[in-house]
Image: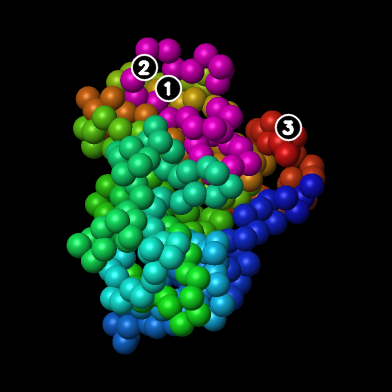
Amino acid sequence: MALRGENRYLELREAADHDPFLLFGASLKRELAGAPLYRRALRCLDMLSLPGQFTFTADRPQLHCAAFLIAEPEEFITIRYDLVSIDCQGGDFLKVFDGWILKGEKFPSSQDHPLPTTERYIDFCDSGLSRRSIRSSQNVAMIFFRVHEPGNGFTFTIKTDPNLFPCNVISQTPSGRFTLVVPHLRQNCSFSIIYPVAIKISDLTLGHLNGMQFKNPSAGCGGIGDFVELLGGPGLDPSKMMPLADLCYSFHGPAQMKIGCDNTVVRMVSSGNHINRVTFEYRQLEPYELENPSGNSIQEICLSSP
């Protein structure tokens, strides 16, 4: 059971194991920013976490391929096609998705993304090079592709741009600290951690009443339009996760919880009437903590999931 957190999303992690750059921290990435453009071949299943130029060339028919792109939490991703040689009429395709899809689940969820799902797909075979550059709405994006003819393929360049108010984020790392700020915007923002974690909320500022109150998740925060909820589950889509705790009022922490789910989400719901802010730290749970939960922990819901 303790290995569930380590083995989930295996198809992503296997791709990452072949890319040592994925393990580099932010400081090293900044040092590399001044170096010549990073270039390498793209695999049929791949994960990319650094700006650079990537080329896929089919050596045989490749029918089910995807590249997962992830940047720092405070960055957008821009994908620019440099060269495309595929046969759209012959069944090839090349699509960018604004977010991630894994096992049929989307991040951000349809509820939290500013665009309807159909508009989150950009199909090269429909738009051609009229959409040479595509920018994500958050720090993750995907490329789906199919290439039948050996020798065909494509080249694209990834660059990142600063996002002053990141809303939907997938963490690159199993531990860290983050402040989510929603400034007078009517939107829902999710910070996703694809590990079982211990999470500590040190500060929550909502635009209404002061004081701290943990509500029964089934009761929610009633008519309050601004609140934070902790979610957990085995998949990627926050809208399909189990609500674990609702934080309905401002407080200065810490409030701590261990969540033994494959995926943990801190989700802020904002009415647009206030500036809302939540600061939290997180770390991946150790195997012994999953085997022997103690203290303020939520295990049963997640560990009973398939």
Residue 223 magenta-highlighted: yes
Residue 265 is a magenta residue: no
Q: Which region is colored magenta?
A: 216-243
Q: Mark 3 or 2 closer to N-term? A: 2
**Residue 224 seen from this side:** yes
Q: Residue furthest bottom?
A: 36
Q: Position of residue 198 (x, y in %)?
A: 60, 44
Please name the amino acid that badge 1 sits on: Cys
Which of the 4 image quarters holds residue 184? Answer: top left
Residue behind mark 3: 300
Image quarter for residue 270? top left
Circle 1: element type: loop
Query: Circle 2 is placed at which residue position?
Result: 224
- 2 or 1: mark nearer the eye: 2
Could you tell me if the residues under marks 3 and 2 are in contact, i.e. CB atoms within 8 Å?
Answer: no
Frontmost residue, 174 versus 204 = 174
Q: Position of residue 176 (x, y in %)?
A: 49, 55
Along the line of sight, the residue nearer the viewer: 10 or 34: 10
